[in-house]
Image (tube, grey):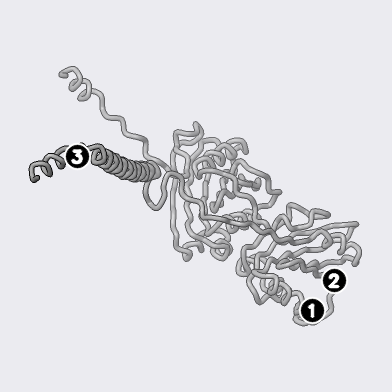
Amino acid sequence: MCLFLLVCAVVPAQEPAPSSGPFPAVAEFPQFQKILSERSFDKPARLSEVEDGRLIADVGFERYAQRVYAAGDSGDISIAIITLMDFRAAYSLLTLRRSTNIQEGPPGDAFAAASRGLMFFQGRDWVRVDGPKAPLDLLRQVAISVSNRLGARGQKPPSLIRHLPSAGCDSASVKYFPGLKSFETYSGSQAFKSLNLDSDAEIAQALYAVDNQMGTLTLLSFPTPEVGEDYFNNFTSRAPEGKQREKTYLKRAGPLVAVLKGRLDPKTADRILGSISHSYAIRWIYEKPKRKGVSWGIPVRILQTVVSSIILVILLFIVAIIAGAGFAVLRFVRRRRSSKKAPDWLGQTDSTKLR
């Protein structure tokens, strides 16, 4: 016992290293020397300190965090993590702030290389790793470390992206907007007015080139087919006046409306718009799934034990009733038989004496 107390006094208690959240610890990479700066905020007003702050706010901002490391010969490495309202906003920011093709992760659910590093989206987080002097391999390792700390991957791009026609599409030009506000901020008021939008919608946009003819396709997803139909029917009457070299082609499929603008002939436009379609699916849900291990707020094992006990008591009660009834019937039968077989000489003796 004394030896145990002595060992406990000599050996200090080991405490877990403090967590650095989504940011890598300095000791994780040999190139990291120290943390130069760190900041975080959740007030949209402070986005004025950040590049494209207004666009980030319009997409759906929730929280900003940044850490800058000193990395010796690799220069300074900056990690910025922006938490947005949902995965659509995070994916939108990736499409709007990248300059190269988007690739499937890791790092993240999808990523794109940048001039000084790379960026990716994962869930509702958008991450950018910058290092002007750092090798791309190091930046990728840092990005993967951040991605692993953010949790599980597996989020797909918004379904509207899959409706963009593949023929002639310039994948590097694909942009996604979760709403009108971000579209107007990014594209400008003139481009926004040219679409005559007065109802909120998801927007996907890309450049197309077919047979040396080029155009811009804007794919709109409205809340309901009826809203899409109204927009489709009223687009021509609300189109801005003036001479335009570009031709405009429209196609509607359910709640989707495609607006194709450019110097394209009708045949080429039809090749691009022809593949756009929309289908409906029905899923029958018979009952609400229960949480594993819990039912009505009670752990399943405890609930099963209680139910089994109640059933056992009921069975024992039924057995007792049956046994009691059987015993009563048996006694009744035996008494009846014994009364029939009893001798009657006592009655005869008494009558003799009376005579």
Classify residue 214 by image quadrant. bottom right
Mark 2 or 1, nearer chain start: 1
Q: Nearer the viewer, mark 3 or mark 2?
A: 3
Q: Residue at x 46, y 36 (%)?
A: 33
Which percent across, then down, holds residue 205?
A: 72, 61
> What residue is pinned by disc 2?
247
Q: Is residue 309 visible?
A: no
Residue that mark 3 sits on: 344
The percent position of residue 339, horizontal first and vertical second, equals 23, 41
- Describe the element under mark 3 as helix, strand or loop: loop
Q: Is residue 333 visible?
A: yes
Q: Are marks 1 and 3 in contact (CB under 8 Å)?
A: no
Q: Nearer the viewer, mark 2 or mark 1?
A: 1
User: Quick check: 137 left or right of 166?
Assistant: left
The amino acid at mark 2 is Lys
Q: Secondary structure at mark 1?
A: helix
Report crowding for label 1: few under 14, some 14 to 19, many 20 or more residues within 10 A (C-alpha).
Answer: few
Residue at the farthest top position: 3
Q: Is residue 274 above or below residue 150?
A: below
Q: Earlier in the sequence, mark 1 or mark 3?
A: 1
Image quarter of the C terminus: top left
Front residue of 198 and 276? 276
Residue type (three-letter) at the residue carrying disc 1: Thr
Q: Give the secondary structure at mark 2.
A: strand
Residue at x-position 90% and y-position 66% = 265
- The picture places residue 103, in percent across and down from the top left corner, at 68, 45
In 3D space, how far apart are the residues under numbered discs 3 and 2 (Cα atoms)? 126 Å
- Which label sits on residue 236? 1
